[in-house]
Amino acid sequence: MTILKNRLFWPAAILVVLLVVNAFTSNQFVTVRDGHLFGSLIDILRGSAPLVLVALGMTLVIATGGIDLSVGSVMAISGAVACLLISDLGNQNSVGSVLLIILVAIGVSLLAGLWNGTLVAIIGIQPIIATLILMVAGRGIAQLITDGQIINVQSGPYATIATGFFLALPVAFLIAVAAVVLITLLTRRTALGLLLESVGGSPTASRLAGIRAKRITVMVYVVSGGFAGLAGLIYSANIKSADSIAAGNLIELDAILAVVIGGTALIGGRFSIAGTVLGAVLIQALGVTVVAIGVPSDLTLLFKAVVVVALCLSQSPEFRAKVFGRFKTRTEAIA
């Protein structure tokens, strides 16, 4: 069947299965309380917001043939900058001051992305090495900002971006939706998407065709840094503190996994925003389901790995051809 050959069919099917499991195992799947939506489904959507943002930036970077390993560290830097500045405010509930601090933190994250883009596109360092530098150094920078301590804040406006609601929906989820819509419009309604795929498919050919490949490469790393910074703000606002060690820890691997699940080619030249979002939500749903069905904490990562391997095998045309081809042959022999 044609639908079975669609690359997004199996991730979507597994996501539906996970949601059904959550519907039967959780006390409240979706409910309305004080005019807001709550329940395990809402927890999945809200919890997936940081990963969706990071994976969006990662998708653009991978589409150009690169990779960004520094997103977790940029998250830590962003949260550290925001919480440090908010903690110094005389009135932490000042909306104007908090908004200005958020802009400053995102600005710092954009500069981190600019650093990566410069190393990759201008200086010519391999993307995995260039971003590995900031991946390691970024944690140190975040610890320098926080002086190695966890900075706690008590700011209502800042907490709103992670735990607040707007039109009954979580603000964090709406931020992720806005980012997805923006990137989709920019890449599918303008020539930007084609330029990204051209640069990822062949940087030399795209340059000879008149495309400013270096400028586009720098741009995607800047965008990736900005989205990582925004994700870091949501993370730190959720726990009302800056934890430079835990913030964004290993999220780069989940982001790469979400991109791969969504059908984006790791060698560049092809990307899917919808697939990336599906992959990110699936990973978050898997994490929530593991807790809901009572998998022991020491087996959580192994359980997730088994599910991911099964998913990747189901997406492989060669694997499906061997398994279903052999099954079909046996059926025909019996008939």
Image (cartoon, rainbow, N blue to C red):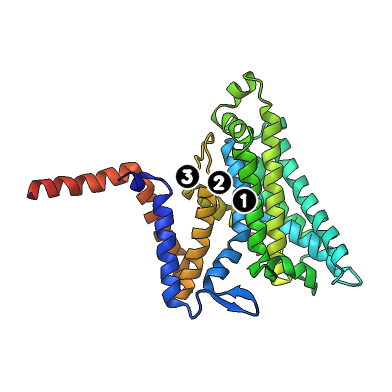
Residue that lies at the very extreme toward the top in this rendered image:
208
Considering only vertical position in the picture, is 156 above or below 270?
below
Disc on res. 273: 2
Residue 132 located left or right of residue 306 = right
The quarter of the picture where residue 66 lies is top right
* Disc 2: CA contacts within 10 A as few (<14), some (14-19) or many (>=20): many
Residue placed most toward the observer, 305 or 172: 172
Q: Measuring 85% from the left and 58% from the top, which residue is drawn there?
A: 100
* Element at label 3: loop
Q: Is residue 165 visible?
A: yes
Disc on res. 44: none
Report, in whole angstroms, how far the alpha carbon at label 1 lies from the one at label 3. 16 Å
Q: Earlier in the sequence, mark 2 or mark 1?
A: 1
Instruction: Please name which of the two marks, 1 or 3, marks the residue nearer to the observer.
Output: 1
Residue type (three-letter) at the residue carrying disc 2: Ile
Instruction: Please name which of the two marks, 3 or 2, marks the residue nearer to the observer.
Output: 2
Considering only vertical position in the picture, is 111 above or below 193?
below
Residue type (three-letter) at the residue carrying disc 1: Val
Disc on res. 263: 3
Residue 319 located left or right of residue 79 = left
The quarter of the picture where residue 322 lies is top left
Q: Measuring 76% from the left and 55% from the top, which residue is drawn there?
A: 141
Residue type (three-letter) at the residue carrying disc 3: Gly
Name the residue that disc number 1 marks. 180
Report, in whole angstroms, how far the alpha carbon at label 3 lies from the one at label 2. 9 Å
Q: Earlier in the sequence, mark 3 or mark 2?
A: 3
* Element at label 2: helix
Residue 302 located left or right of residue 95 = left
* Disc 3: CA contacts within 10 A as few (<14), some (14-19) or many (>=20): many
Please provide percent x and percent y for residue 176. 64, 57
* Element at label 1: helix
